[in-house]
Amino acid sequence: MGNKKPLHSANKIIIRLPNFLGDSIMATPAIRLLLENYPNASLTLVCKAPIKDVFKKLPNLERVIIDDTKNGGNRIFKAIRLIKEIRKNKYELGILFQNSLANAIIFRFCRIRNLVGYKNDLRGILLDSSFVLDRNIHYINRFAGLVNNYLNNKFKKLPALRVWNGGEVKKWDFDNNLPVIALSLGNDAQMNRAYPQKLSWELIQQLVKSRRYNLVFVGDAKDAERNNEYESNLSVEDKKYVRNYSGKTDVDTHINLIKAADALITVDSSGMHIAAACNIPFIVLLGRSTSPFCTVQPKVDFGRFLKNENSLIEVDKFISQISPTQIIHELSLIVHKQKEEVLP
């Protein structure tokens, strides 16, 4: 059976976002294509709870449904509850950016008129319009390609990444006008994807003692364990140049901290994608990756990606080959370029 023809118009569209924050940001160009093609449609998003903050001010957003089916407890009961919640509205179009078989089964029971997704893992029989997934292409192209394939390849160009979070951009309380650098250097749970603790401390000390930058620690409660230790080891004078927000913010505030920074140094892919979407220069420290980096690397020209293999066999040691001196050199180039761009 062939795919259904794309709807000429739609009043209600439901979108199942990817499970990870960075992946959901990479799906925003696809959502912009949907909005351009269906400008009068109301949108419902289904996502994990932390992701909702990225889309607070999304145009045409009617509601957000939290998918907690994997958060412990009776998964079958939670799936049935989710299906009942989605069925309350008669959606004409459903777009599945999350590619699991279980997700396709759930949405098939939701009585959506046209269900669109990739046909991997036997999902094709559950979808009204299904397409072959090429796992070698960039995630942005993967998500946008799904929408564009459904629309018979109507669009030729990718829209830019966006975040539609709420709140206000942070106003810093430093007693100087130095550039503010957000730092997300990782935590113990990330193991060899985190920047080593000894090197992180060396980097922080060199940055602070140079008196050229203010530093802002960002991240979740896991990041706070290391960041609190770094903060406690600083001298009273050095602490004047550091603020520690790790473990103290929700996703919305986390985004606004990055928006307010002059640059971000990170090992975290979600922070990288937030910076890319907000036009904030960033430096990514690369070690072991959960996905081939070429499929998630931001498509912007203001990011720097540091990876030193030094002919090592063990990939777990790659990130330890990036020196604080190298990071600071790259940071100085970013800050210098920014100063040049603001000169009359």
Image: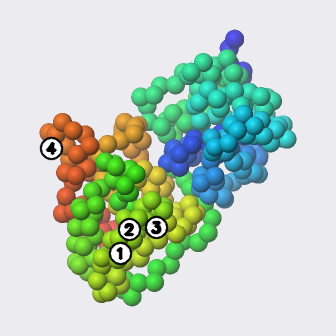
Rendered image: mark on residue 227: 2
Whole-number angstrom distance, CA of label 2 to CA of label 1: 6 Å
N-terminal label among 1 and 3: 1
Disc 3 marks which amino acid? Ser
Where is residue 122 drawn, in percent x and y?
60, 18
Q: Which mark is residue 231?
A: 1
Label whose residue precedes the other's in the sequence (2 or 4)? 2
Above-or-below relation of 135 to 258: above
Q: Tags 3 and 2 in contact by the CB under 8 Å rule?
A: yes
Give the crowd class for mark 4: few <14, some 14-19, many >=20 residues within 10 Å: few
| Three-letter amino acid code of the residue under disc 1 | Glu
Q: In this image, 29 relative to 304: left or right?
A: right
Residue 34's image quarter?
top right
Which dot marks residue 285?
none
Residue lying at 39% horizontally and 88% vertically, measured from the top left: 175
Residue 305 drawn above or below residue 169: above
Q: Nearer the viewer, residue 122 or 302?
A: 122
Q: Residue furthest left?
A: 311
Q: Quadrant of residue 71?
A: top right
- Quadrant where the N terminus sits is top right
Marks 3/2: CA–CA distance: 7 Å
- Contact (Cβ within 8 Å) of mark 2 with mark 1: yes
> Which structural element holds mark 1?
helix
Q: Are marks 2 and 4 in contact (CB under 8 Å)?
A: no
Residue contact at pointers 1 and 3, CB within 8 angstroms: no
What residue is shown at x 60% (from left), y 60% (from top)?
A: 165
User: What residue would you read off at disc 3?
Assistant: 246
Residue at left 56%, top 56%? 163
Q: For the residue carrying disc 1, how many other residues have a C-alpha within 10 Å: few (<14), some (14-19), or many (20+)?
A: some
Give the labeled residue for mark 4: 310
314 relative to 93 in the view: left or right: left
